[in-house]
Image (spheres, rainbow, N blue to C red):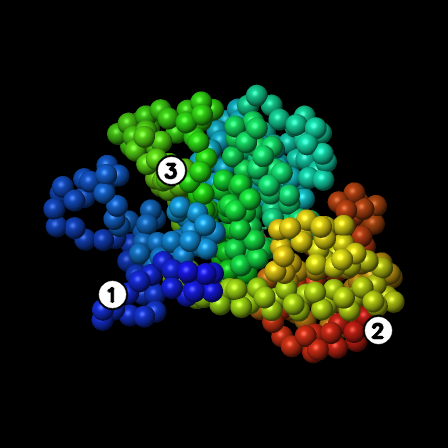
Amino acid sequence: MRIESKCIHSGYEPKSGEPCALPIVQSTTFRYTSAADVAALFDLTKAGFFYSRLANPTVDAMEKKIADLEGGVAALATSSGQAALFTAIATICRAGDHIVASSTIYGGSFNLMAANLRRFGMEVTFVDQTLPDEELEKAFRPNTRLVMGETLANPALTVFDIERFANLAHRHNVPLLVDNTFATPALCRPIDYGCDIVMHSTTKYMDGHAIQLGGVIVDSGRFNWANGLYPEFTEPDPTYHGTVYTEAFGNLAYIVKARVQIMRDFGCCQSAQGAFYTDLGLQTLPLRMERYSANALAMARFLESHPKVERVNYPGLPSSPEHALAQKYLPNGCSGVTSFVLKGGREAGARFIDSVKLATLEVHVADIRTCTLHPASSTHRQMTDEQLAECGIEPGLIRLSVGLENIDDLIEDIAQALENA
Ligand SMILES: *Cc1c(COP(=O)(O)O)cnc(C)c1O
């Protein structure tokens, strides 16, 4: 099947007489009639459901759909995107390990990696992803175990050269993890370019309606965990009766370990109701991504031609320094988020925000509604202009997540707000 059909039919195949819509299995537990059946489940020799922290039929269907969309072998849903990143890393790395990550990643991911992972004894080196390979090589250490970046970064809107970073990671025998939240598999499939593990905040475009938090990890099934650098995959796990993940699960070793170790012990699971909402969003994903991309490109073109706008960030614009990479990785559209810098600085930014009518002021992106934010008067308001400059945020920077309203209505609203700014 092609992506539009997978979004509708993958993951859940009702048998004769069963509901067409994905049923919400609102149950924590599952009944069995023999001790041997339960023993087989606990020994991981048989697949099945026994407790919804580990697996639930509704969540399972949504996971299978996303794995199929990304071209992976299996997926694990989590309670949020943050939980997906933590789970993805904790399955691979432990105290004493080192990670190389792009510096232009989501702020929450940066905090997790820069501050909290350090508390767990892991270290992260953040690199400028535009540096040539010779410079990037210098970030690697003997204890490096993972490389990470974002296909289309939130909010920097830089495009990650997935193929180049996959080759770089593989030269060091370590996997590449890509956060594909902003692109979604409708616009880019990182596994097609050599990425080993994909993660998402499903809270964004996959849900698409700003109703359900969630995350997901997809395993390509292609990384060789038995290359000598990952003893937790090749040595017996005493908490699972001495299971050796690479021997028992082959190309599913990573995703099984993520589920039965990290999800079991940290418990950041998705709910059946949450998976139902996420799956509902997924059914229209390709259609929505096409329109988000068209609306955002039209908006970016309008902004670029406006006299009050100093600069527009959108990889779909031919003038963007990211355009060449966007043509390779995002040929069918660059998603819905754009940002621009107003000429009047901090005051103009605040006046713009106070003047928008159709666009809503919210600390979110990838909503079905167009939403906008002025960091200098909201999320970063305690900072001086000099401090903002250090974080790469101009005082007049506006983030605009273009929604699915009519584009003429949107441009009219932004035009009148620009007049007032
Ligand atoms: C929002 C976001 C996250 C975090 O996801 P939550 O669902 O909010 O926990 C991670 N990565 C990216 C790129 C995001 O946009």
325 versus 289 height, above or below: above
Q: Nearer the viewer, residue 418 or 295?
A: 295
Please tell me whether mark 2 sits on a helix, a strand or a loop: helix
The Cα–Cα distance between marks 3 and 2, rounded to whole angstroms, is 57 Å
Q: Nearer the viewer, residue 291 or 36?
A: 291
User: Label 3: few (<14), some or many (≥20) within 10 Å?
Assistant: many
Q: Quadrant of residue 129?
A: top right
Q: Which residue is mark 2?
A: 419
Cβ atoms under marks 3 and 2 closer than 8 Å = no
The Cα–Cα distance between marks 1 and 3, rounded to whole angstroms, is 29 Å
Cβ atoms under marks 1 and 2 closer than 8 Å = no
Q: Is residue 170 visible?
A: yes
Q: Amino acid at mark 3?
A: Asn
Mark toward the viewer: 1 or 2? 1
User: Label 1: few (<14), some or many (≥20) within 10 Å?
Assistant: few
Q: Which residue is mark 1?
A: 15
Disc 3 or 2, which lies upstream in sequence? Answer: 3
* Whether the residue under disc 3 has CB within 8 Å of ligand 1: no
Residue positioned 50% across, 37% down in the render: 89
**What x and y, as percent, mark residue 333?**
63, 60
Label number found at residue 408: none
Q: Which residue is mark 3?
A: 251
The Cα–Cα distance between marks 1 and 2, rounded to whole angstroms, is 58 Å
Please tell me whether mark 1 sits on a helix, a strand or a loop: loop
Residue positioned 32% across, 54% down in the render: 56
Q: Which quadrant: the N terminus?
A: bottom left
**Is 182 placed left or right of 297 in the picture?**
left
Q: Amino acid at mark 1?
A: Lys
Mark toward the viewer: 3 or 2? 3
Q: Amino acid at mark 2?
A: Glu
